Amino acid sequence: MKASDLLVKCLENEGVHYIFGIPGEENVDILDSLLDSKIQFIPTRHEQGAAFMADVYGRLTGKAGVCLSTLGPGATNLVTGVADANMDRAPLVAITGQASLGRMHKESHQYMDAVSMFRPITKWNTLVHAADTIPEVVRKAFKLAQTEKPGATHIDFPEDVAKADILAQPISLKEEAHIPHPTEEIVRLAAKVISDASYPIILAGNGVLRTRAAESLTNFAVKLNIPVATTFMGKGAIPDDCPLSLLAIGLQADDYISCGFDQADLIIAVGYDLVEYHPYKWNPHKNKKILHIDATPSEVDAYYNAEIEVIGRISETLDRLSGMVRIREKKHIISVLRNTIIEESKGMCNDKSFPLKPQKIICDVRDVLRPDDILICDVGAHKLWVSRIYPVYKPNTCIISNGFASMGIALPGAIAAKLIYPERHVVAIVGDGGFLMNSQELETASRLGASFVTLVFNDNGYGIIKTKQFSVFGRSAFVEFSNPDFVKYAESFGAKGYRVEAANELKPILQDAIKRNGLSIIDCPVDYSENVTLTQRLNKLACPVSL
């Protein structure tokens, strides 16, 4: 068979349902082979959009999303989405078409060393030198992409190799490598550390969601009466209507959740990745006792020097500890901290000012979405508000990039979410800056018949950078811009456009947009002066009580 046919058979063998990408001269053989495959190739309008779709697909399913480009500029356009998946721990396999082997030794049209370019942003990548290595290359790419901690891999596929004749078959899939069981001795030591602590706090990260350990974490926290703060990417690790949930930690300001960490004598870090929220923010004096619970050993960091590391399947570790740790009855400051957070998040739900306060927008979004509906949050000032005050009740229903934290992920991500969960409502929350970075994918969504809502926080500028500039310099620089008419822009893609012109209009507009069978874009003016006042309020509220 032709080598490109073998590649596609290997992808089918890995359970691939979709490939997101753009056609090019050097990947035409792969595209032709896909015509006879059950895999659906989804042409996108930019390779970055394709990579973000694969990124979010991998994060929601745990199976590697696949993106495809041609060589040269096609490959470079994939880089941001691939890097995002790798740092956010989402399984992804990127495939790039490449020049023939016979012209790689010299200056040649559009040729560049893609393997060297992708090396720093992938777990592993390779150039396919010979067609008979394809089964091994594909199997290794998927195995490494999906093995904890997951991330991105890359296959560079020369056009002459794609055309070669080959007699080979995909490698049969075996049971994936098991995460080891924690030893009895280390579990007993961990149980003693928790039992001896007076005021422990759990810091739950993205790894809890990746390993499907949210139920075990919630049971552990409730049984042992230990409060839980999540990272931005860990939202949903515990339901936010649980009395022990402190919602998310991750703002730069000192605040009441930081107060809880300041006064805790043990931090139980579960599935925590340092890229989510650096430990010098919550352990500035390097004096916290830390219990590390994860599937892999901890990163070496001066501010994260774990007392004990329990390495193994997170759910198993938590389930075993639940039966070994002394149940604490002592009251802690959880009720005060939690009530402060809830008051902050709900304080402006009925605010009538215009442009709308971010808190008001978040309240209305939460009111119209069901617990298992999905919110995809882009990167910008709005992310801080979604991360901090948007309540999440089920795992993987609020997707936030906070490792690589790349703008432009939400709209492509919403397309992937809708492909996976067509029965759920999906809302992409974007800033006006991030929206126009990948808004061309509205055409992809329209072509696919995807139905979701894009809510644009419109402040005619890069709001979070403006806030930072004012806090440091007392003035802003080069952060303001103008926008197109978003209603007309939506209509040009066949979508329904809405413009919010009063605070009480947003909720009914959201309800109407969600009920529609099709794409909707909502232009919502936002007042980001709250970014500054929030920081001021948080500093005043820090440490409201003493343990």
Image (cartoon, rainbow, N blue to C red):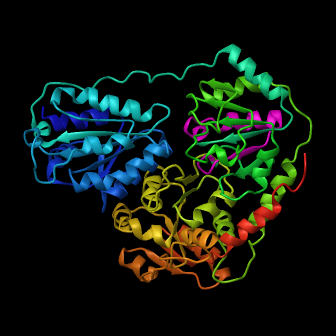
**Magenta region, mostly helix, strand or loop?**
helix
Residue 335 highlighted magenta (yes or no): no
Quadrant where the C terminus sits is top right
In the rendered structure, the answer to whether residue 206 lies left or right of residue 63 reads right
Q: Is residue 243 visible?
A: yes
In the rendered structure, the answer to whether residue 147 lies left or right of residue 105 reads right
Q: Quadrant of residue 174?
A: top left
Of 322 and 196, nearer the camera is 196
In the rendered structure, the answer to whether residue 279 lies left or right of residue 97 reads right
- Taking the spot 54% from the left edge, 71% from the top edge, the residue there is 513
Instruction: Give the image location of residue 79, x and y in percent.
Output: 34, 51
Of 303 and 545, nearer the camera is 303
Instruction: Give the image location of residue 12, x and y in percent.
Output: 30, 36
Residue 227 highlighted magenta (yes or no): yes
In the rendered structure, the answer to whether residue 88 lies left or right of residue 162 reads right
Quadrant where the N terminus sits is top left
Of 423 and 474, nearer the camera is 474
- Taking the spot 56% from the left edge, 20% from the top edge, the residue there is 180
Q: Is residue 508 above or below residue 72?
A: below
Instruction: Give the image location of residue 383, x and y in percent.
Output: 58, 61
**In the rendered structure, which segment of residues is drawn in magenta?**
207-234
Instruction: Give the image location of residue 408, x and y in percent.
Output: 44, 62
Q: Is residue 244 visible?
A: no
